[in-house]
Amino acid sequence: MTAIKETSTIQENKALAFVACPVTFVMEKIGGYWKPIILFSLLSGKKRYSELNKSIPAITEKVLINQLKQLEHDGLLIRKSKPVVPPYVTYELSKTGKALRPVLFAMAEWAVAYSDKFSEAFSVQMKDFPNETEID
């Protein structure tokens, strides 16, 4: 990961935004296009890298690796590696990552309620949303 200059104006502005609005903090951790998709995919349980890659077919390997590193750095997922050939790497949500389930569920419910032409398709997909007992 690229080093972040701690004294930059952008970093100072982010620090001020975190204090002013807790949603900014959350969006810094789970924001972007791919992170919520990765988190949703891991709600159903531990997955190997290849399973994650197949479950998100539009993502490039470079982006997936980068997003997984960021999520691990932020403490939202746990990467376990076994020193074998070929490498055996699994990813699972940490306790902090699992605590995001209600947030992701609320986002999905909002999509069903306000997405107009996609509402019907989204409501069908809600049946597959992992419940809390499935992720503990």
Image (cartoon, grey):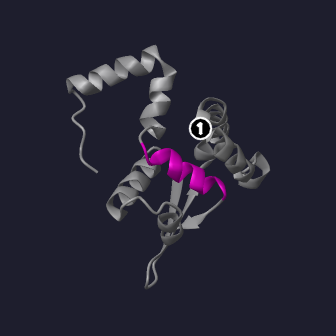
Q: Residue at x 63, y 31 (%)?
A: 110
Q: Position of residue 42 (x, y in %)?
A: 59, 56
Between residue 110 and residue 38, name the one nearer to us. Answer: 110
Extreme-front residue of the structure: 117
Extreme-top residue of the structure: 20
Query: Is 58 part of what is drawn in magenta?
Result: no
Which residue matches tag 1?
117
Residue 117 visible in rendering: yes
Between residue 87 and residue 130, name the one nearer to us. Answer: 130
Extreme-bottom residue of the structure: 85
Task: Give the quadrant of residue 47.
Answer: bottom right
Residue 75 visible in rendering: no
Q: Residue at x 43, y 83 (%)?
A: 86
Q: Amino acid at mark 1?
A: Lys
SS of the residue at dot 1? Answer: helix
Q: Residue at x 20, y 27 (%)?
A: 8
Please tell me whether residue 90 is drawn above or below residue 64 in the rendered image.
below
Q: Position of residue 94 (x, y in %)?
A: 59, 50
Between residue 7 and residue 135, name the one nearer to us. Answer: 135
User: Quick check: 79 left or right of 42?
Assistant: left
Residue segment shown in magenta: 33-44
Please tell me whether residue 61 is drawn above or below residue 5 in the rendered image.
below
Task: Give the quadrant of residue 134.
Answer: bottom right
Q: Residue at x 41, y 40 (%)?
A: 32
User: Quick check: 43 left or right of 59?
Assistant: right
Estimate how packed mark 1 is, as few (under 14), some (14 to 19) or many (20 or more) residues with alpha carbons within 10 Å.
few
User: Quick check: 23 left or right of 28?
Assistant: right
Between residue 60 and residue 66, name the one nearer to us. Answer: 60
Q: Position of residue 43 (x, y in %)?
A: 64, 53
